[in-house]
Image (tube, helix red, strand yellow):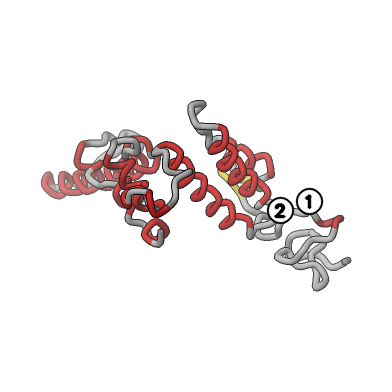
Amino acid sequence: MTGKGKGTGTLWGPDCHPDHLRSPDMVHQVDPRNEGRILLTEGWREKTLLDHHREISECQLSDHVPERVAVAYETAKNLALYSWYVYRFVPVSELQATIALEYGLKVFYEVEERNREKVPRKYRGLGNLLRAAVSDGRIRNEGFPIWHQIARGRARVRQLHEASEQMLELGLEQISYDDEDVETKEQDYDWDFADGLCESRDCMLQ
């Protein structure tokens, strides 16, 4: 294997495809789909394995989560980590994380050891388990960073619109606006992320 991947400086070639079984000497070769990626950290630079690991390590479970559930989730994190070398591990890690979520809910509702026929319908499948957790208040919008991020984005758009209207009203050609000074209001949070999660296609297939 002497040919280099296009623009990557790696040893990928016709005899070594990143989606095929690796030879021992290529096990730790970064997948070309991860090379050249950049992040904004004190300027633009290439993303490294350390950056990749840092992002994944930020996903932490509570100390109250049972060990067997935590192991299932940590397996998903390891798969995500090794997707640096095998890009196709990304959907596998997502699937494992979903399995860990369902397993955790089964453990919480004490249905993991029961015969399926004896499990109440509301606890069958991930979609129903999520609905039960949302209904019980165990899963709330406030627990999802994305819910707050999108609300802030909606607030920013709303304030821009309000500033534009004020500019037209006063007949001004310009108006000062600080994009960092965003104040969220109740209306910006007027959407149910948790409920949408229960209705997602992956959960509906359960």
Q: Amino acid at mark 1?
A: His
Q: Position of residue 196 (x, y in %)?
A: 31, 52
Q: Amino acid at mark 2?
A: Tyr
Marks 2/1: CA–CA distance: 6 Å
The quadrant of the image that shows the N terminus is bottom right
Element type at marker 1? loop
Left or right, 188 with respect to 148, comes to: left
Q: Residue at x 27, y 34 (%)?
A: 183
Q: Position of residue 45 (x, y in %)?
A: 64, 45
The image shows residue 19, relative to residue 67, as above or below, that is below
Q: Image quadrant of residue 182?
A: top left
Q: Earlier in the sequence, mark 2 or mark 1?
A: 1
Q: Residue furthest bottom?
A: 14
| Mark 1 lies on residue | 28
Q: Residue furthest top?
A: 63
| Mark 2 lies on residue | 85
Q: Position of residue 130 (x, y in %)?
A: 36, 46
Q: Residue at x 22, y 48 (%)?
A: 161
Report whether residue 94 is seen.
yes
